[in-house]
Image (cartoon, grey):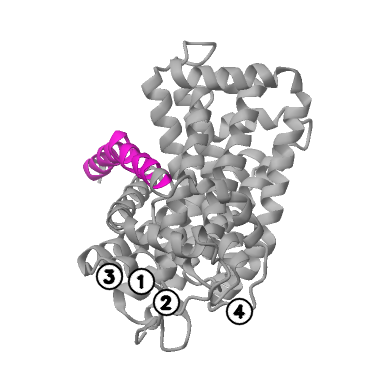
Amino acid sequence: MEAIAKLVSTIDGWLWGWPLVIILFGTHLFLTFRLKFIQRYIGTAIKLSITKDDFATGDVSQFSALTTALAATIGTGNIVGVATAIALGGPGAVFWCWMTGVFGIATKYAESLLAVKYRVKTADGTMAGGPMYVLEYGMKSKPLAYAFAFFGSVAAFGIGNTVQANSISNMMVNQFGTPTWITGIVLTVLTGIVIIGGVKRIASVCDKLVPFMAIFYVLGCLVILVMTFQTIPATIGLIVSSAFTGQAAVGGFVGSTILMTARYGVARGLFSNESGLGSAPIVAAAAQTRNPVRQALVASTGTFWDTVIVCAMTGITIVNSGVWNSGLNGGDLTNAAFNLIPVIGPIVLTIGLLTFVFSTILGWSYYGEKCVEYLFHSKKAIVPYRILYTIAVFFGSVMSLAFVWDLADLFNGLMALPNLVSLIALSGVIVSETKKYLWDNNLDEINQEEMVEVDL
């Protein structure tokens, strides 16, 4: 097992090093230019996300699909991931993390557009979609479709489940001395109650939980920034300058080169917003929308909120607090920043992480079950998957998960590869649909294409 763990860790480190960073960020840039900077429509996208569409076809509202995707996306990466990037790459990592959000909007838009365009209707009238259906019906490649579905179903147990539960159980031990098994039981029961009800119950919970958790956490960051507002201009300057120069050793910080700074910032940003991984399009395909472009615009705001706003707030708060060069890492670094708020600081952070983790578990449960549904071509596989997924929450809370984290990270990266192939190969379709509905001012037009029906 030790040899296997070492091998997985080595492969994981290589995959999430420069290869995947270059491929993912390169795709972001390619689609940004191919779509004539689709980011300029972010205002329209936000407006659409809160607009009810009575003439749409789908299982859940556009807003519910967005909040479910945000639930899965906003997680430990926004708190622990950003802090880790700063600890390893210095303040400049915040800039590169932010840039992945800005350019990643184009990729999230593109993959969500394809997911809606190639979604199918199942025997009970519900929608099914995501990269596996794009790969099968858009690219005519079942092997790649099955590969994505397999990687996604496994990754959900790791990055969307056990490692999330482990993060909050460890923080509960450190902050309040709560035994891991108690945290595990509570999380397991809550998860089971929600996910057994399917996507509509998950979406209903996420509708209420996501806005609260994001606002609550951002307010905590704002309080810290107000307390240290005098140094904000210098902090912004340090973040930008360090992004292009690296950072010399300061205090407990060991120093970094520009390559290290860019790598850790980009990698953690990509990991956090999931643009290009193919996860969010799975729930985008269930949205009630008139045409693929409307939902693609709505889905693209997920990357905006996750990285451009929440990750940036975490990064600026940590650097501005001055704790970034203390020698701490990960959650301990973020915790040190929140300790600047007397008494309630750690509580605010714990509540923020707890809600982030729980929402991620919910969102990824839907991703995983849709992948399993595709693999077995049957809805009968969903209930056993939900039961196993719920049980895994408890084990994630009480186990040491260094190996599981690496394994989950690996499958998460492998998910991206077939999805990125479809984005590049079908970029012409993406541009054509965008022209038809957005550039030619037909956003209100109802898509007349006949939907494929499958016997699931």
- Magenta part mainly helix, strand or loop? helix
The structure residue drawn at horizontal position 54% and vertical position 64%, both measured from the top left corner, is 294
User: Could you tell me the amino acid type at mark 3?
Assistant: Glu
Q: Nearer the viewer, residue 138 or 170?
A: 138
Find out whether residue 11 is within the magenta segment: yes
- Marks 1 and 3, how far apart at CA: 15 Å
Q: Nearer the viewer, residue 132 or 73?
A: 132
Q: Are marks 3 and 2 in contact (CB under 8 Å)?
A: no
Name the front one of labels 1 and 3: 3
- Marks 1 and 4, how far apart at CA: 30 Å
SS at mark 2?
Answer: helix
Q: Are marks 2 and 1 in contact (CB under 8 Å)?
A: yes
Q: Which residue is mark 1?
A: 372
User: Could you tell me the amino acid type at mark 1?
Assistant: Val
- The range drawn in magenta is 3-32
N-term-proximal mark, 1 vs 4: 4
N-term-proximal mark, 3 vs 2: 3
Q: Which residue is mark 2?
A: 382
SS at mark 3?
Answer: helix
SS at mark 4?
Answer: loop
In the image, taking residue 320 as reference, residue 71 lies left or right, namely: left
